[in-house]
Amino acid sequence: MGWDGDDVAGKMEEVFERQQAAADARANRGTSSVEERARSAKFESLRLSRSRVMSQLAGATNPAHRAMLEAALKSINDEMAQ
């Protein structure tokens, strides 16, 4: 399983920017529902988890550990993209 950190980081930055723009638009509207706030909190949690996993991945040398972190990162990325 190949891993190109710049490619993954670039894709995730795009996802993050889209999500952030959507969150900003909702905040500017001033009509934030409970559901929207919960979704925003979940996204922030995923963003922090993604950051932690990427930091761990940068220092991981064991192939099995790297594979586990890559799978976790993919899962987080998939959730963030929704």
Image (spheres, grey):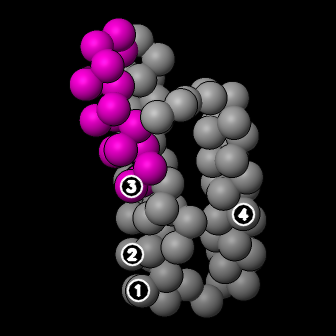
The image shows residue 35 at horizontal and vertical percentages of 42, 86
Query: Which disc is residue 18 wearing?
Result: 4
Q: Amino acid at mark 1?
A: Val
Query: Which disc is residue 11 wearing?
Result: none
Q: Residues within 10 Å of mark 4 (few under 14, many from 20)?
A: few
Q: CA distance from mark 1 to mark 3?
A: 25 Å
Residue furthest to the front in view is 1
Check disc 3 and report the residue beneath it. 75
At horizontal 33% and vertical 32% (from top left) the residue drawn is: 67
Judge depth for marks 1 and 4 and give the one in front.
4
Q: Amino acid at mark 2?
A: Ala
Q: Earlier in the sequence, mark 1 or mark 4?
A: 4
Check disc 1 and report the residue beneath it. 34
Q: CA distance from mark 4 to mark 3?
A: 18 Å
At horizontal 67% and vertical 79% (from top left) the residue drawn is: 26
- Queried whether the magenta region covers residue 66, the answer comes back as yes
Residue range highlighted in magenta: 60-76
Q: Earlier in the sequence, mark 4 or mark 3?
A: 4
